[in-house]
Image (cartoon, grey):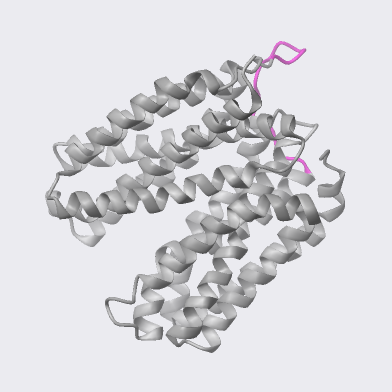
Amino acid sequence: MVQLKTRRFAAGAFFFLTGLCFSSWASRIPDLQKKFQLSEGQLGSVLVGMPLGSLLALPLAAWAVFRFGSKAVVLAGMSFYLLFLLGIGIAPDAFVLAIMVFIFGMMGNMMNISLNTQALGIEKDYGRNILSSFHGLWSLAGFVGAGIGALMVYLEISPADHYLIILLLGAAMLVYFEKGILSDAKKKESGGGGFVWKRPNTTLAQLGMVGFCGMMCEGCMFDWSGVYMAKEVGASAAWVPSGYVAYMGAMASGRFLADRLANRFGKIVVLQLSGFMVFAGLLLSVLFPVIWIVIPAFILVGFGTAAVVPLTYSLAGKSSAYAPGLAIAMVSTISFFGFLLGPPLIGFVAELIGLKGSFALMAVVGLMISFWVWVGRDNFTAVPS
């Protein structure tokens, strides 16, 4: 019997490795753009394959976890995630690059659903909230991957060689931690029909809206925090990335703290507080666009968004109406549309009323996190803890 701590350590290693793969890809995007001489528009066409692949993979991932179990999908998904990362690095032209990015996005969400299903099983056996700490490891890997990427650029190592190094490291981790990933029973419905993608019930739909608002705010910070620092705050080139770094650092730290807070005060309280923090942080950045206020404001936003996705997944995975993988996929699908729609919405609104107006709108979206938690509080508290 695999010990509980061994299972937690192994799952954490896979969360970290997944984050490392993603940040390794992201850190070399400028080099890939230069290699293939892509314009901003052409690069955008390549990059859109990532979210499209991720979205397409959601029902597929739920079916695979249902049919084969989360362990099989974790191990297969991680193997292909590493291989297609290398595929991005060795792509001979922009067309193949776009295909590799699309499939890489698919494999990323295969890992998302299967790993969260595996982690929820561990959380259930622990009898307390631990899912946020797994997501914290993913965020931590983002810093590590970005640092490794910067080092590779400094050493003039090509993306292909960089990704080969990550592949070899990942393969070693895959072999070493494989035994810590628990096999779960394959699910079969009594009617013999097997897996069927279903319409989410009210509880999952409300959780999806919480995640939708949270991920829309995440997308805002990922894509627009640097632009806001440059255009509205007027930060120097050296300070432009500081807002994003502050946000990401707070989000990573917040995920390691979120489980303790949820265990002490309950998930509902933490989620409601999260929405208010996002609202307050974004509103401060709009009202006082000076660097010494905006950076702490972005830190507040980071702490606010930290717990939203992990806690909504945790609540979804405890649904008695659906298998955990399917419930997570349903909530993730709704949530992910927020991540897709947020960044372009900000750009469109900024064209009409300016970037400050866009961030003010995102502040309202942050407040909607608390609103949807309030709307669904009775359903959420009815979910087994």
Indicate the quadrant containing the N terminus: top left, top right, bottom left or bottom right.
top right
Quarter of the rendering occupied by the C terminus? top right
Relative to residue 79, is residue 260 drawn left or right?
Answer: right
Q: Can residue 346 be seen in this snapshot?
A: yes
Residue 377 part of the magenta segment = no
- Image quadrant of residue 193? top right
On the picture, is 155 further left or further right than 164?
left
Residue 59 can be seen in this image? no
In the rendered view, tell whether residue 315 sits above or below residue 210: above
Q: Which residue is drawn at 44% across and 77% down?
A: 350
Q: Where is residue 263 in the image (x, y as percent from the top left)?
A: 76, 49
Q: In which quarter of the image is residue 227?
A: bottom left
Q: Nearer the viewer, residue 5 or 74?
A: 5
Q: Where is residue 135 in the image (x, y as percent from the top left)?
A: 55, 46
The range drawn in magenta is 188-201
Q: Look at 59% across and 58% down and name the residue there.
A: 254
* Residue 91 point in image, percent of width and height: 18, 36
- Residue sitting nearer the eye, 332 or 153: 153
Q: Which residue is drawn at 29% across and 31% down?
A: 167
User: Which residue: 73% across, 29% down?
Assistant: 125
Where residue 363 appears, x then y in whole percent? 60, 74
Q: Nearer the viewer, residue 5 or 184?
A: 5
Q: How many labels does the image show?
A: 0
**Would you say 141 lies left or right of 205 here?**
left
Kindly report the secondary structure that dominates the magenta region of the rendered protein: loop
Q: Quadrant of residue 375?
A: bottom right
